[in-house]
Amino acid sequence: MPSLNTAFVAGAFGGISPELARYLVRAQGGQLGVWLGKLAEEPWASILVPIVVSAVVLLLLGLLGGLVAHFGNEPNIGKAFMLGIGAPAFVLSTFNAAGPVKEVVKDTKVQDASIHWSVPRENDYLASLGAVFITAGHAQDLPMQTPPVPQLTFDTKAIAGACPTCRVEFQDSSGSVLSSEPVGGDNATVTVPDAATSAILSGVPDTNSAKFSLESLAPLNPEGGNRPLSVEVIKSRNYLNDFRYILGNNAIEPFDLELKAAGVE
């Protein structure tokens, strides 16, 4: 029995050793300091959470490594240590292999997108007269109404003021890029391409990019002119990102974007 207890302790040290070594490398390279620096203006809990998550991850890895060495009935401390390394390393490598390696783009739903750019109600009496007395030949002589060009205005005051690095990228249904426009400062209003079905907002400091559907937004008012729909951009803390970062996803950022349709300007 003492040998099994010794195997558990050796396996536990083996389980945390790879992750602990990675923590030390990150700390020495300044990566952990950069991550915590992004939270400097947040409440103290925002800095405490990644520290607690790191401790919990080490505890779980140590427990996993210790159990593997314990149930492996390995009396040799060195071999128990190696057994402890194996299982957690496999779990971490599998998790990291499934994660993104480049910029993180998160699917985001535009809140309050039920705001409609409604068509002004016509006078029913005049409309009925028009339907009766305007002939098809006369209707052909009427000037054609050009449908307004869809436009979006991004309000970034809540996140970074002018946000000079903010951009929006419009994509069609196949994911092909149709256009990419800056949306900071005086360039906050952009024209939506005809075939665009989704858009990606990026460039907000310390924040993951947000992909949102354009089909969920109400259609433009065909008689209201080119009035853009205003989208308020809000940066929110996501504590789950701490866990993803600690497990090796270096592309993740501590903040996500929330988008709110603020109505027609």
Image: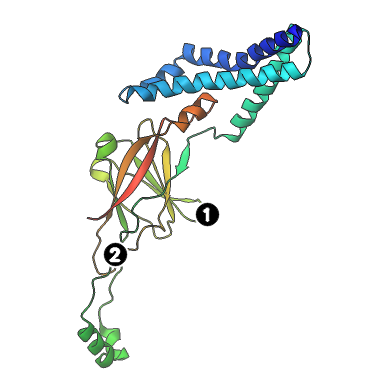
Question: Which residue is depicted at the point 25% across and 78% down?
Answer: 143
- Give the position of the C terminus as an image quadrant: bottom left
Amino acid type of the residue tagged 1 in the rendering: Ser
30 and 82: which is toward the camera: 82
Q: Residue 48 at x, y = what percent? A: 40, 21
Question: Which residue is depicted at the point 49% across and 23% down?
Answer: 53
Is residue 256 shown above or below 170? above
Q: How many labels does the image show?
A: 2
Is residue 191 shown above or below 32? below
**Residue 197 appears in which quarter of the rendering?**
bottom left
Colour mapping used in the image: rainbow
The answer to whether residue 250 shows anywhere in this view is: no
Question: Which residue is depicted at the point 32% across and 59% down?
Answer: 150
Q: What element carries label 1?
A: loop
**Residue 63 appears in which quarter of the rendering?**
top right
Question: Which residue is depicted at the point 54% across and 35% down?
Answer: 100
Q: Which mark is residue 148?
A: 2
Q: Residue 260 carries which label?
A: none
**Residue 159 appears in which quarter of the rendering?**
top left
Q: Residue 30 at x, y = what percent? A: 44, 15
Amino acid type of the residue tagged 2 in the rendering: Pro
What is the CA distance from the residue labelled 2 to the residue labelled 1? 25 Å
Q: Residue 49 at x, y = what percent? A: 43, 24
243 and 22: which is toward the camera: 243
Q: Earlier in the sequence, mark 2 or mark 1?
A: 2
48 and 116: which is toward the camera: 48
For label 1, the residue is 174
Q: Residue 133 at x, y = what percent? A: 25, 92
Q: Relative to residue 238, is residue 131 drawn left or right? A: left
Q: How crowded is mark 2: few (under 14 residues within 10 Å), some or many (20 or more)?
A: some
Asked if the residues shown at circle 2 and circle 1 are in contact, with their CB atoms under 8 angstroms apart, the answer is: no
The answer to whether residue 143 shows anywhere in this view is: yes
